[in-house]
Image (cartoon, rainbow, N blue to C red):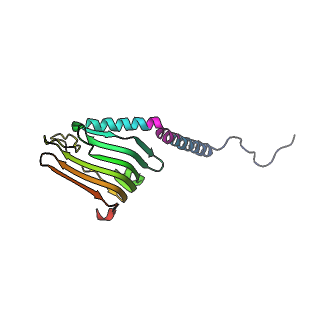
Amino acid sequence: MTARSGTQSNPLPPRKGRFLRTLAMLGAGLCVLVVVLLLVLQSDAVRKFGLERVTAYLASRQVDLQTDSLRYNLFALSIEVRNLRLRSAATTDLPAFVRVGRARLDLSLPQLLRGRYVVQSGVIDDVDVEYVVDADDRNSRPRPPSGPNAPRKPLNYLISSLSISNARVRYTNQAQQVDVALSLSPVQVIGNAMTE
């Protein structure tokens, strides 16, 4: 029988090592869960559900929203729509107030987390704004109902860069027999947070 000299290795890791390993595994699991959740939120079924919820919310505010396609990317924080039509729900017999052929907007995540909407870059093509006032003095502009005691908080937003091409604006007042149409040159909007 021989005596062993020196230290014998302990098969169980020290308590601190187990804690760090468990913490690392939980962190990795949480990261995987977040990535899977983001992928699920970008599925066609969830996009369709989201569009239905936005449409229903706007309908409750007397705004009719229709679009052929709505796509978003949560990783790049971008939104793309095709054939968007926005009109007053109270005057569906009048033309749509706004029609957009295609729009793509890239938003700022850090600003969004602060409660501020910042369009870092965007492109809007084929825009038609048609403000119609009919003979009964009804108009095509959507107006959400506002209660007498409901204070309106202004929307906190900034457009850093936006390009608008092929835009047309038309104003028609049937009672006054006015019909004015303008075609706009390409418009470039550049905003600066320092000049707000």
Most extreme residue toward the bottom is 195
Nearer to me, 67 or 172: 172
What residue appears at the point 34 percent right and 55 percent down from the top-left corner?
A: 166
Residue 92 belongs to the span the image colors magenta: no
Q: Quadrant of residue 52?
A: top left
Q: Position of residue 126 (x, y in %)?
A: 35, 52
What residue appears at the point 13 percent right and 42 percent down from the top-left corner?
A: 135
Residue 41 belongs to the span the image colors magenta: yes
Residue 152 in view: no
Where, quadrant-wise, is the C terminus in this rendering?
bottom left
What residue appears at the point 86 percent right and 42 percent down from the top-left corner?
A: 2
Q: Position of residue 180 (x, y in %)?
A: 20, 54
Q: Report whether 185 appears left or right of 39.
A: left
Q: Which residues are magenta?
A: 36-46
Q: Quadrant of residue 187?
A: bottom left
Q: Quadrant of residue 71?
A: top left
Most extreme residue toward the right is 1
Q: Position of residue 175 (x, y in %)?
A: 12, 45
What residue appears at the point 20 percent right and 46 percent down from the top-left corner?
A: 132
